[in-house]
Amino acid sequence: QVQLVESGGGSVQAGGSLRLSCVASGRVTSVNVMGWYRQTPGNQREFVASEARGNRNYADSVQGRFTISRDGARNRNTIYLQMNDLNPEDTAIYYCNWRYGDLQYWGKGIQVTVSS
C-alpha cells in the first residue's frame, strides 16, 4: 500500500498562486511516476501534470503556468505543483497520483478555488 497526503490547497483570486504538496509513504519504490489530476463536479478526472525520472509532462491548459517538481532525500517521494496565474477554470479538487507498473494510488484530494 502507498499512502498519499496532499496539502496546500485553498482559495485565491484570479491571477494568484498556490503551491500544492504531496507526500507518498508506505511501500514506495524509488522508480515511479507521480503527478496531479483534477476533477470538477460532473466531469471526469483530468490529467494536470506528471514527473518521472526528471521528465515532466503537462496538460495544455496549464502549460506555462504550472510547474511540477519532486523532492526527497532518497526515494524522492514528495512532489509539488506550483500554480501561477490561476484562473477560475482551475477551480477543482486536485488529486495526487502515484504509479508503478500496474499499481496506482490516489490521494484523497484537496480543494483549489479561484475567484474572479
Image: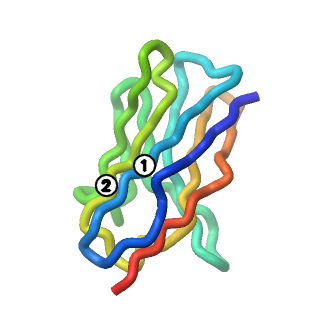
In the rendered view of the protein, which quadrant contains the N terminus? top right
Residue 25 pos. (x, y %): 63, 27
**Quadrant location of the C terminus?**
bottom left
Camera-side residue: 54 or 15? 15
Question: From the viewer's perspective, is residue 8 above or below residue 56?
Answer: below
Is residue 97 positioned above or below 111 on the image?
Answer: above
Looking at the rendered structure, the kind of residue marked 2 is Phe
Left or right: where does residue 116 sit relative to residue 34? left
Residue at 39% over, 32% down: 70
Q: Earlier in the sequence, mark 1 or mark 2?
A: 1
Q: Disc 1 marks which residue?
A: 49
Which secondary structure lies at badge 1?
strand
Could you say where residue 27 lies in the image, as x and y percent from the top left?
Answer: 70, 20
- Kindly indicate whether the residue at mark 2 contacts the one at mark 1 (C-beta within 8 angstroms): yes
**Based on the displayed image, in which of its 4 quarters is residue 55 positioned?**
top left
Q: Amino acid at mark 1?
A: Ala
Residue 82 lies, in percent from the top left, at 33, 51
Residue holding disc 2? 66
Q: Nearer the viewer, mark 1 or mark 2?
A: 2
Q: Around disc 1, counting alpha carbons within 10 Å, would you say few (fewer than 14), some (14 to 19), or many (20 or more)?
A: many
